[in-house]
């Protein structure tokens, strides 16, 4: 099997792909990037936490104009995953207002985003409608 | 309380040299947190941040806030070539001298010793295209379009949709009607980039940029500039009666940034900092939203204008949809919004807009707005917001002279 790496470092691959956040041990604020200190309480101690893979769509836009190299249209989405807000694309459903609705239930999914010259696959995440 | 008695409470410098495994914000954060610790205070005590970084893409102050404490205080990003650091300190000192805050933080940072991307250090050059995680998210490729959108029309489309999810009542047609209003208003503004009336059908059938924002629902990219001279009351009173009559009083001039909240790294929170700026401005000016005769707010996209009705407290919380539907924000309504045509039709030459919308308000307060004059205008509000973020709110009043 080809070597796989995550598209971003907060995506954890494996048999149970999920997003991982840095949680401030003092106030519980969660961040997906490396932080020097907590933006909320200025604390400097963090621990890794697993973000739920199921969520609710609370904002979206169907983008038809984007930078060169971006496949359009795509659905940009803000998802509430059990209290943690997550950014991602809605995938595996037609990108139009009939199929993408505020409040719809979604779940994390992963896919191969590209392959480099050494055959390494970059795995990205998105959210697909959950029934 | 204004004061000439200024002191340096805490101060730090990092080791200067090559720091390939630290990005510019790592270094700035180290210095900022060091200075705060040296002074025995926290970001909670700081009332203003002035920051300078010449080589970066801008917004270093807000980037620092996110890494040391995102408390919503005014940020001044300064640039003066080699005098940038001193300018940052001077800016913080001015705010304290003026009595607006009693403590300010100034930061200057630069990375000149090469790119220093995280994770890429030590890798030998190769002719092959090989994935190399870089940046604080360890991304192996561009994120825009692959993980959500970073484009302005898309970001602000989501801002409007988020309001709809929370309070209901938003539709593509509603947002398009906001653009219809602004395009209609601009027909009376000879200085607007676009002065053509557009029907609702034309707007909704226009090229879609990022649903629900079509091209005519987006701010118009154009060239332009604006400038203003400000004086003290003491100085004004030495000038001619005509100058005093046409002078417009600045009742409030407020700057805020976005305080941290849970989702702000996912979708910029353009709401809290606007509401904070508006609240402070109304308090300083001694007026309320009902006293406003006109408002020029930041309709970078039609979806943005809706949420700012709520953020500027022109309507009750959650009531922006009903407020718009009542006709209140048309030039004939009780709170005319963007009679200039707004950013959507008048245009948005970015650095000019913040002064240009103040010009529009002043034009009416002086009684010089001709065909588009809001009769009897005495008090107006101007609002702008830049992502990163920063919000400016000014309340202006007609001269009593």
Image (spheres, coloured by chain):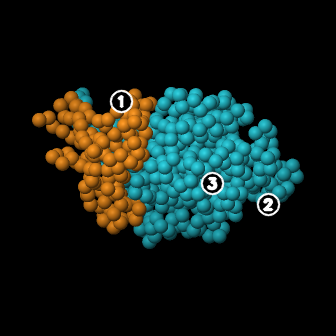
Q: Earlier in the sequence, mark 2 or mark 3?
A: 2
Q: Residue furthest left?
A: A1
Residue neighbourhood size for the residue with mark 1, other residues' Cα within 10 Å, grouped as few (<14), some (14–19), many (≥20): few
Front residue of this view, candidates B376 and B152: B376
Pointers 2 and 3 in contact (CB under 8 A)? no
Residue under the image location 70 percent in, 50 percent down:
B334
Quarter of the figure with residue B15 = bottom left
According to the image, label 2 marks what residue? B234
B293, B142: nearer the viewer: B293
The residue drawn where x is 34% and y is 33% is A94
Q: Which mark is residue A71?
A: 1
The CA distance from mark 1 to mark 2 is 60 Å
Separation (CA) of disc 2 from disc 3 = 33 Å
Circle 3: element type: loop
Quadrant of the image containing the N terminus of chain B: bottom right
Q: Is residue A32 visible?
A: no
Q: Position of residue B277 (x, y in %)?
A: 58, 57
Between B264 and B188, the one nearer to me in the picture: B188
Name the quarter where the C terminus of chain B is drawn: bottom right
Instruction: Using the image, name the chain to which the residue with label 1 belongs.
Output: A
A66 shown above or below B250: above
Can residue B140 be seen by looking at this rendering? yes
Q: Nearer the viewer, mark 2 or mark 3?
A: 3
Looking at the image, residue A60 sits to the left or right of residue B390; the answer is left
Q: In screen coordinates, is B18 left or right of B365?
A: left
Nearer to us: label 1 or label 2 = 1
Q: Which disc number belongs to residue B314?
A: 3
Q: Which mark is nearer the camera, 3 or 1?
A: 3
Specify the chain shown as orange. A
Is circle 3 on the same chain as circle 1?
no
Disc 3 crowd, CA 10 A, few/some/many (<14, 14-19, 20+): many
Q: Colour of chain B?
A: cyan
């Amino acid at each position: 099997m080809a070597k796989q790496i995550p598209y971003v470092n907060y995506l954890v691959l494996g048999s149970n792909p999920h997003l991982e956040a840095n949680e401030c041990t003092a106030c519980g604020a969660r961040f997906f990037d490396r932080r020097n200190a907590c933006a909320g309480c200025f604390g400097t101690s963090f621990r890794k936490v697993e973000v739920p893979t199921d969520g609710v769509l609370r904002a979206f836009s169907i983008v038809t104009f984007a930078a060169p190299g971006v496949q359009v249209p795509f659905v940009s989405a803000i998802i509430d995953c059990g209290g943690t807000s997550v950014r991602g694309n809605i995938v595996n459903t037609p990108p139009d207002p009939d199929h993408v609705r505020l409040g719809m239930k979604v779940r994390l999914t992963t896919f191969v985003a590209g392959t480099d010259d050494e055959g390494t696959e970059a795995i990205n995440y998105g959210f697909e409608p959950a029934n | 309380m204004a004061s000439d008695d200024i002191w340096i409470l805490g101060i730090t410098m990092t080791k200067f040299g090559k720091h390939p495994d630290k990005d510019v914000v790592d270094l700035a954060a180290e210095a900022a947190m060091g200075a705060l610790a040296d002074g025995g205070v926290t970001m909670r005590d700081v009332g203003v941040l002035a920051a300078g970084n010449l080589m970066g893409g801008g917004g270093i102050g807000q980037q620092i806030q996110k890494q040391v404490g995102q408390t919503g205080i005014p940020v001044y990003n300064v640039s003066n070539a080699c005098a940038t650091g001193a300018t940052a300190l001077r800016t913080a000192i001015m705010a304290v001298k003026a009595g607006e805050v009693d403590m300010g933080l100034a930061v200057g940072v630069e990375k000149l010793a090469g790119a220093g991307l995280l994770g890429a250090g030590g890798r030998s050059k190769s002719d092959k295209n090989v994935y190399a995680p870089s940046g604080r998210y360890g991304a192996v490729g561009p994120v825009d379009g692959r993980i959500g959108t970073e484009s302005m029309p898309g970001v602000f489309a989501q801002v409007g949709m988020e309001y709809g999810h929370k309070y209901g009542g938003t539709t593509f047609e509603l947002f398009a009607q906001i653009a219809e209003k602004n395009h209609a208003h601009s027909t009376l503004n000879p200085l607007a980039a676009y002065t053509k009336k557009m029907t609702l059908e034309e707007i909704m059938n226009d090229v879609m940029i990022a649903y629900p924002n079509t091209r005519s629902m987006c701010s118009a990219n154009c060239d332009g500039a604006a400038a203003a001279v400000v004086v003290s009351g003491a100085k004004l009173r030495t000038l001619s009666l005509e100058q005093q009559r046409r002078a417009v009083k600045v009742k409030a001039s407020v700057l805020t940034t976005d305080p941290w909240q849970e989702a702000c790294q996912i979708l910029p929170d353009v709401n809290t900092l606007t509401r904070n700026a508006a609240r402070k401005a109304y308090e300083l000016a001694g007026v309320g939203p009902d006293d406003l005769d006109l408002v020029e707010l930041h309709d970078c996209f039609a979806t943005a204008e809706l949420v700012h009705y709520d953020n500027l407290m022109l309507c009750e919380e959650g009531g922006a949809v009903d407020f718009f539907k009542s006709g209140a924000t048309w030039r004939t309504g009780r709170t005319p919004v963007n009679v200039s045509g707004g950013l959507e039709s008048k245009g948005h030459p970015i650095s000019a807009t913040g002064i240009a919308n103040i010009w529009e308000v002043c034009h009416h307060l002086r009684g010089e707005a001709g065909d588009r004059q809001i009769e009897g205008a005495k008090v107006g509000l101007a609002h702008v917001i830049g992502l990163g973020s920063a919000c400016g709110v000014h309340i202006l009043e007609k001269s009593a002279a």
